[in-house]
Image (tube, grey):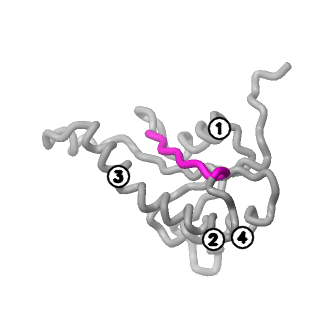
């Protein structure tokens, strides 16, 4: 017997950010998964560690994280509108905010989240690519 969790192939983990490429990836997934049965969408937003300067200036990490979480709400709302706009039920759409662990890079946090939530597919927008390579 394997120690690996069961992966659910119709459970999609989709990154949410304020970038245009993130919206394109969300629209792509909505168009594809909107026609599938038994699908689950987990929208996630990664919050990196607070920069050292932020704490040095007298702010707390709680202030940092709550501010970042608050800014994520309209991003989740917009993505949810896209998914429900193609006919998906709100009951199959979840929101998840993940804090990067100390010393962890964002890509590792995404892979950790994919494993922890047993998602079969991770959907992300790409940054730093030419227009020809975008969705």
Q: Nearer the viewer, mark 1 or mark 2?
A: 2
Q: Nearer the viewer, mark 2 or mark 3?
A: 2
CB-based contact (under 8 Å), mark 4 and mark 1: no
Q: Which residue is mark 2?
A: 85
The quarter of the rendered structure image containing the N terminus is: top right
N-term-proximal mark, 4 vs 1:
4
CB-based contact (under 8 Å), mark 1 and mark 2: no
10 Å crowding of disc 4: few (<14), some (14-19), many (20+) = some
Q: Distance between the Cα atoms at labels 4 and 3?
A: 28 Å
Q: Nearer the viewer, mark 1 or mark 3?
A: 3
CB-based contact (under 8 Å), mark 1 and mark 3: no
Q: Which residue is mark 4?
A: 31
N-term-proximal mark, 1 vs 2:
2
Depth check: give the residue in front, 135 or 91: 91
Residue 87 lies, in percent from the top left, at 69, 67
Q: From what the image shows, is residue 58 above or below residue 2?
A: below
Task: Report the magenta residues as a range.
Answer: 91-99
Residue 65 lies, in percent from the top left, at 33, 43
Q: Residue at x 56, y 61 (%)?
A: 80
Residue 45 lies, in percent from the top left, at 49, 50
Residue 112 lies, in percent from the top left, at 59, 37
Q: Which residue is mark 1?
A: 117
N-term-proximal mark, 2 vs 3:
3
N-term-proximal mark, 4 vs 3:
4
Helix, strand or loop for disc 1: loop
Q: Distance between the Cα atoms at labels 4 and 1?
A: 23 Å
Q: In terms of secondary structure, what is the magenta stretch mainly?
A: strand
Q: Which residue is mark 3?
A: 70
Helix, strand or loop for disc 4: helix
């Amino acid at each position: 017997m394997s120690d690996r969790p069961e992966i659910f192939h119709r459970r999609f983990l989709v990154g949410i950010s304020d970038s245009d490429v993130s919206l394109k990836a969300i629209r792509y997934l909505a168009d594809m998964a909107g026609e599938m049965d038994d699908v689950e969408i987990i929208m996630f937003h990664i919050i990196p560690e607070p920069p050292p300067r932020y704490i040095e200036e007298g702010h707390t990490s709680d202030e940092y994280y709550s501010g970042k979480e608050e800014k994520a709400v309209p991003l989740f709302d917009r993505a949810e509108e896209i998914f429900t706009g193609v006919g998906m039920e709100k009951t199959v759409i979840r929101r998840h905010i993940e804090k990067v662990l100390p010393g962890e890079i964002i890509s590792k946090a995404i892979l950790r989240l994919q494993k922890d939530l047993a998602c079969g597919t991770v959907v992300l927008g790409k940054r730093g690519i030419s227009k020809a390579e975008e969705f």
